Image (spheres, helix red, strand yellow):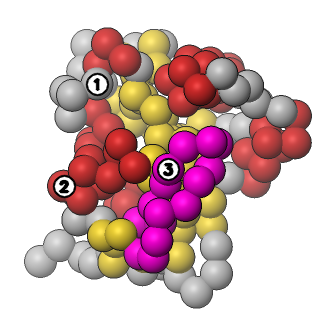
Amino acid sequence: MPATIKPFAYLSDDYQKALKLRDRVLRQPLGLYFTEAELKKDENDIHFGLFNGDIILACLILTETENGRMKMRQVAVDSQYQGKGLGKELSLAAEAYALQKGFTVMFCHARKSAAPFYQKLGYHIVGNEFTEVNIPHYVMEKKLALLT
């Protein structure tokens, strides 16, 4: 069955699957766990997942900000599917969604270890390295444009 990318609602069954994936891939390796306050921030965001049937393989969250900027966050790909292009496919779908909604820049707080992934997608580092969730990060951004 081919993988499909779809949005899903906060607190839906798909959200719960994505939350488990995010926890397993992004938080547990750092010895961290989501707080209720952190999860409450997800309420007004746009959630996307890449699914094979009912199984979630990758997910991300989009947060609308000001000045035509959309923040991509909590990008997670199931460890057994990493390196197979799923993160790229999902990120490009998120960029297309943002562009369709009138946003002109996508940005993220990328883990230093993930910076090469984002650079391959056309993102560039903005500013200095900083610490978030106890590890080095960069703000990275990409100007969104219609493909011609």
| Amino acid tagged 1 | Gln
Residue located 47% across and 63% down the image: 129
Image quadrant for the C terminus?
A: bottom left
Quadrant assignment, res 100: bottom left
Disc 3 to disc 1, how far (Cα)? 21 Å
Predominant SS of the magenta segment? strand
Image quadrant for the N terminus?
A: top left
Extreme residue toward the right, this view? 36
**Residue 106 spot, x, y in % from top left:** 44, 68
Query: How would you rate the neighbour count of disc 3 (Cα within 10 Å): few for under 14, some for 14-19, many for 20 or more?
Result: some
Disc 1 to disc 2, how far (Cα)? 15 Å
Quadrant assignment, res 130: bottom right
Please say whether residue 112 is visible from this viewpoint: yes
| Amino acid tagged 2 | Lys
Is 130 one of the magenta-colored residues? yes
**Residue 73 spot, x, y in % from top left:** 54, 50
Are discs 3 and 1 less than 8 Å apart at CB? no
Mark 3 or mark 1, which has the lower sequence index? 1
- Dot 1 corresponds to which residue? 82
Nearest-to-viewer mark from 3 and 1: 3
Q: Specify the label residue 136 is tagged with.
A: 3
- Point out the stretch of residues depicted in magenta: 126-140
Residue located 48% across and 13% down the image: 54
- Dot 2 corresponds to which residue? 120
